[in-house]
Image (tube, rainbow, N blue to C red):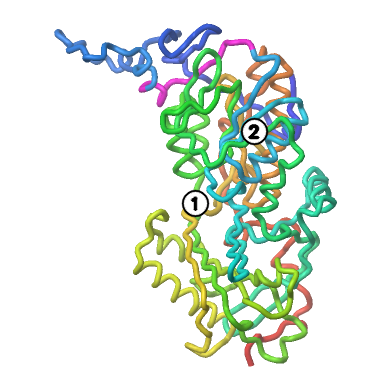
């Protein structure tokens, strides 16, 4: 049996493709000439009576449209021999998708990454920069740690290339009333130089076999002549020998719902995601700290016991080379419970909701710092964002999922956890698995089926994700704890 890199600890399970209604795509097949083999179609299976005098459409009967309607139930099976020069389409340009393309290149495989980002790549590696006022905010992933050898090797390369640096600032847990406890970490913490998004934009800087299309919203997957045809709003964007879905949420579910990949779609639908509000706020002056705290000025804190706030970080200290004066840019995240309770369509947030959430979160900051009500000075700049599909709350605990019959896979942090390291490891695993599949010639597809039936388990961690090596229970001696307020 052929095994895949990084997959060996996991049992490969067979697809168990249903014997009825499987879509078989022969080497010269097309949506207009494909045959439904091994059983009746969905319509026949439901014993629907034929109409005596069916009305023909003015456009005639389209076999292609009939097949498209059946994709929700039928499994696509490619019988075309795999290409000697395969090309992979990757939908999603976050950490997982970018690393997947990078490691496909290592295996000599070309790829195209499709991403919807208007300002840059990155997904949750998101940074907002406002030049006129010199404001900078990481408004999604705040930092990351590295514990796995494969990821540590990649991180060391980023360090050498000046893409990231160690975050030496103190972080800890902050409880209502200003009680701050620094956290012990057995792993180094890293942040991107000038934010997370520049790191994402630089990951492929030395790649030569990766094409990036951005902004591009792929909304149709269609098998045709032994390849996947990817389209955005009816416009063909490319044809590929295999595809990788490297994003999640309702858009991914919608994309997969009619793709002819029912087992892939089912696993994606099992994923549960939290919702979290992000408040970016810039203050003219530093947030108030008592004089006694000057020896331990934290740059980031996991907030405990306050419903509206779960994390706060000083971007100006974390990201800026100028540690002196100037605007003080903070990122505040809500708890997942607060996000769920105040969830609205993130594309169209009502003004009343935005104002209520902002007030609640700033009040939460006051409580966390132990400040008197109304004493926190009003920020001169704020921006509120709802991450409606913020972080996974459950996971199958495997690095990737692959359907060898449909030549399609899934990668992302949610397969292993909720952090950037998990995303990178997943991207590596997906790339190596696909490379092994193509190298095998595709003659033994069952050997390459992975994760299609794996059950999910609940994830545990902070509201803003997991950080391997950062243990909330391993704290510096309590004698170092102090109150931020007097």
Residue 80 among those drawn in magenta: yes
| Near-viewer residue (169 or 109) | 109
**Disc on res. 389:** 1
Quadrant housing residue 184: bottom right
Q: Nearer the viewer, residue 485 or 380?
A: 380
> Does residue 200 appear in this view?
yes
Residue under the image location 36 percent in, 22 percent down = 69
What's the magenta bit mostly, secondary-structure-wise? loop
The reply to whether the magenta stretch includes residue 97 is no
Q: Residues within 10 Å of mark 1 (few under 14, many from 20)?
A: some
Dot 2, crowdedness within 10 Å: few (<14), some or many (≥20)?
Answer: some
Q: Which residue is mark 2?
A: 211
Whether residue 451 can be seen here: no
Q: Real-space Cα distance between discs 2 and 1?
A: 27 Å
Left or right of 108: which side holds 28?
A: left
At mark 1, the secondary structure is: loop
For this view, does 243 lie left or right of residue 221?
right
Coordinates of residue 286 in the picture (x, y in percent): 63, 82
Q: Which residues are magenta?
A: 69-81
Residue 449 in percent (x, y) is at 63, 25
**Position of 59 relative to 306 (above/below):** above
Q: Is residue 37 above or below residue 218?
A: above
Q: Residue at x 60, y 24 (%)?
A: 242
Q: Nearer the viewer, residue 398 or 246?
A: 246
Q: Secondary structure at mark 2?
A: strand
Is the N terminus in the top left, top right, bottom left or bottom right quadrant?
top right
**Residue 423 or residue 116, whichever sits in front:** 116
- Circle on res. 349: none
């Amino acid at each position: 049996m052929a095994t895949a890199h990084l997959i060996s600890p996991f049992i490969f399970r067979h697809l168990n493709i249903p014997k009825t209604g499987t879509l078989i795509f022969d080497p010269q097949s097309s949506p207009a000439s494909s045959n439904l083999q091994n059983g009746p179609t969905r319509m026949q299976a439901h014993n629907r009576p034929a109409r005596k005098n069916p009305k023909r459409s003015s456009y005639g009967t389209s076999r292609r449209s009939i097949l498209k309607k059946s994709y929700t139930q039928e499994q696509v099976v490619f019988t075309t021999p795999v290409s000697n020069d395969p090309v992979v389409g990757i939908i999603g340009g976050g950490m997982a998708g970018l690393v997947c393309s990078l490691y496909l290149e290592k295996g000599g495989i070309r790829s195209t990454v499709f991403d919807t980002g208007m300002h840059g790549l990155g997904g949750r590696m998101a940074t907002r920069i406002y030049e006129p006022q010199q404001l900078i905010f990481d408004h999604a992933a705040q930092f990351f740690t590295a514990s796995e050898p494969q990821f540590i090797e990649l991180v060391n390369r980023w360090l050498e290339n000046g893409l990231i640096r160690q975050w030496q600032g103190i972080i800890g847990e902050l409880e209502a009333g200003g009680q701050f406890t620094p956290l012990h970490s057995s792993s180094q913490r890293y942040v991107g130089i000038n934010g997370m998004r520049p790191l994402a934009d630089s990951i492929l800087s030395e790649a030569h076999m990766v094409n990036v299309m951005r902004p591009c919203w792929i909304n149709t997957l269609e098998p045709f002549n032994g390849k996947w045809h990817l389209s955005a709003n009816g416009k063909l964007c490319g044809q590929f020998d295999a595809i990788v879905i490297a994003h999640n949420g309702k858009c991914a579910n919608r994309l997969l719902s009619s793709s002819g990949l029912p087992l892939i779609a089912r696993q994606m639908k099992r994923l549960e995601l939290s919702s979290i509000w992000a408040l970016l706020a810039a203050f003219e002056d530093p947030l108030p700290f008592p004089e006694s705290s000057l020896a331990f000025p934290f740059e980031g804190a996991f907030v405990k016991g306050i419903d509206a706030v779960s994390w706060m970080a000083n971007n100006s200290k974390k990201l800026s080379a100028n540690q002196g004066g100037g605007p003080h840019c903070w990122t505040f995240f809500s708890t997942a419970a607060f996000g769920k309770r105040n969830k609205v369509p993130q594309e169209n947030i009502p003004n009343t909701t935005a104002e209520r959430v902002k007030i609640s979160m700033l009040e939460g900051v006051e409580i966390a710092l132990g400040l008197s009500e109304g004493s926190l000075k009003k920020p001169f700049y704020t921006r509120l964002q709802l991450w409606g599909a913020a972080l996974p709350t459950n996971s199958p605990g495997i690095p990737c999922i692959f359907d060898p019959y449909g030549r399609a896979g899934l990668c992302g942090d949610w397969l292993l956890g909720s952090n950037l390291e998990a995303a990178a490891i997943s991207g590596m695993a997906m790339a190596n698995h696909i490379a092994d599949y193509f190298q095998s010639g595709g003659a033994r597809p069952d050997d390459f089926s992975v994760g299609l039936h794996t059950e999910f388990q609940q994830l545990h961690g902070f509201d803003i994700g997991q950080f391997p090596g950062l243990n909330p229970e391993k704290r510096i001696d309590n004698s170092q704890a102090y109150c931020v307020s007097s």
